Image (cartoon, coloured by chain):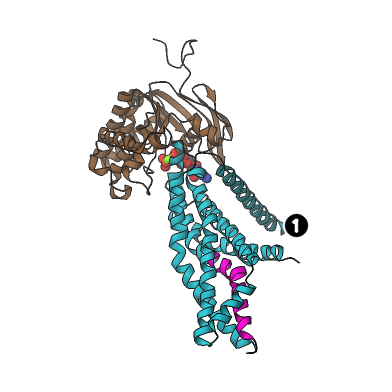
Chain colours: A brown, B cyan
Amino acid sequence: MAHPDEKTPAAPPPKIEARELYKSFGENHVLRGMDIKLHAGESLVVLGGSGSGKSVMIKCVLGLMTPDVGQILINGKDVTHRRGRAALEARASFGMLFQHGALFDSLRIWENVAFGLVHAKGMKRPAAREKAIATLKDVGLDASTADLWPPELSGGMQKRAALARAIAPSPDVLLFDEPTTGLDPITAAVISRLIIGTVKRLGVSALSITHDMACAKTIGDRAAMIQNGRIVWSGRGADLDKSGNAYVDQFVHGRAERAAAQ
Amino acid sequence: MGFNFLLPIGQTVLQAMEGAGRFALFTVQAISHIARPPFFWGLFWDQTVRIGYFSLPVVALTSFFTGAVFALQIHSGSDSFNSETVIATIVALGMTRELGPVLTGLMVSGRASAAIAAELGSMRVTEQIDALKTLTTDPFKYLIVPRLLAATLTMPLLVLVSDALGIMGGFLVGTEALGFSAGTYLRATADYLTLDSITSGLIKAAVFGFIIAIIGCFQGFTSKGGAQGVGRAATNAVVISSILILASNYVMTSILFAN
Ligand SMILES: Nc1ncnc2c1ncn2[C@@H]1O[C@H](COP(=O)(O)OP(=O)(O)OP(=O)(O)O)[C@@H](O)[C@H]1O
Ligand SMILES: [Mg+2]
């Protein structure tokens, strides 16, 4: 079997490729030569400490921020300098789960889930409502939540609803920004399993960022570690414990010790 | 290095220019999105109700009492000779040309500009605006165009209401408190109230509506820093749009009534 990083002529281009990204805010040099490759069908987890630039990286990939230097390729096409509509369309097959859900307050839960179906896919509202309710069930939410407003759900339920909103338009790439932050360990584990289950069931590629080791091990086929604005280690998710990289070890054990102390 | 004292001044000027540049770019972008599909009719209608319909009570009350007090003041300040027609004329022209549009503008600015900034600001800081984009929906089309059009189109209607109620306020004071004849008062109003006066007020109203919405949207869209930032955006929106309304009113009066 060929290593996924090797270029064979027939191999499809990576779903997402970030080349040598640099991004600074004034004197704060956040990204310094960040390289990321997400291949079709794999689930990549990017790990890194707080403030290491994980969210900045994912925002560059999503086109919500522009890198100072570097390129973003989607399905092999350079989309770095696309703006407005072209930038949105380049990412039309992406689904994103935001750290705090980012559900639209002014819309009911089902309208949130149906949003992409109605506005991006042109589905009629009754059909979209049906699909939305089915998708809510897929992520473990009862049909009775459909007519509630986002603030009426708990944090964990909001995350499920946001996951439903991300997957409803049948994306082929899913992105997750700290899917388990702010949840209790049990709910976090449930969400992690739900995510990897969904990714494998839909056969999509996934790029997640997290600093939760348990989550990383559950959802990552492959893992990468950010330090000082670049990737310092990458390997199989299962190998995080035996990476041979000092910083990764520190990260794994620092977390483990803290978790044990709680 | 004898010019170090110039540094802060230069920086402030640069910052102000950068802000103005960003605002100009934002405005151009917003306008360029109006003509291009898709157009969200439902959202436009929602905003029309929120900005226009719900402002009716406050606009009506403000205008009525202003017209009434205006009549009283003119009466106490003028010779009683011929004051019947003088009051009717001044109230009608003052309301339609200046007070109607400006008062309505300031009232709606307080209500709508702040509300728009707060709503979009909280959508910004909770990443809802980013979420819109990841669902392939342009926030300019979904959030800004409906508000911009709703405010620009409903303000003239509100000003018509304001004109009518202001004139009615003056009329009631004239006929009930000052004992003028209703027929004379109304005839004087009709004689001196030209179409020009009304349309100039409506033009101003549309411009004020645009200012209210674009400032609210810009402040909300560019807000950062959590709940505090959202509060700041709302306050800024009211202050800036009020100042712009008064300043642009002067400019428009000097253009529309230049002769
Ligand atoms: N819009 C912005 N303006 C200025 N600085 C920013 C902006 N966004 C991020 N930063 C800075 O970039 C750095 C990285 O932020 P980022 O949000 O990517 O961290 P992170 O790795 O996601 O951390 P966490 O795990 O805590 O979410 C921080 O120092 C932050 O202050
Ligand atoms: Mg983050």
Please give the name of the residue rendered at 69% of the width and 58% of the height, measured from the top-left corner: B9
Q: Which of B174/A53 is in front?
A: B174
Residue A223 horizontal/vertical position (percent): 39, 26
Find out whether residue B88 is within the magenta segment: yes
- Image position of B11 with respect to A33: above or below: below
Residue A149 seen in the figure: yes
Quadrant where the N terminus of chain A sits is top left
Residue range highlighted in magenta: B80-105
From the viewer's perspective, is A259 left or right of A174? left
Subunit of label 1: B
In the depicted view, which residue is nearer to us: B168 or A210?
B168
Looking at the picture, how far across and down is residue A132, in whole percent?
31, 36
Q: Which residue is mark 1?
A: B3
Ligand 2 falls in which quarter?
top left
Quadrant location of the C terminus of chain A in the rendered image: top left
The kind of secondary structure element at disc 1 is loop
Of residues B248 and B185, which is closer to you in this image?
A: B185
The answer to whether A84 appears left or right of B194 in the picture is left
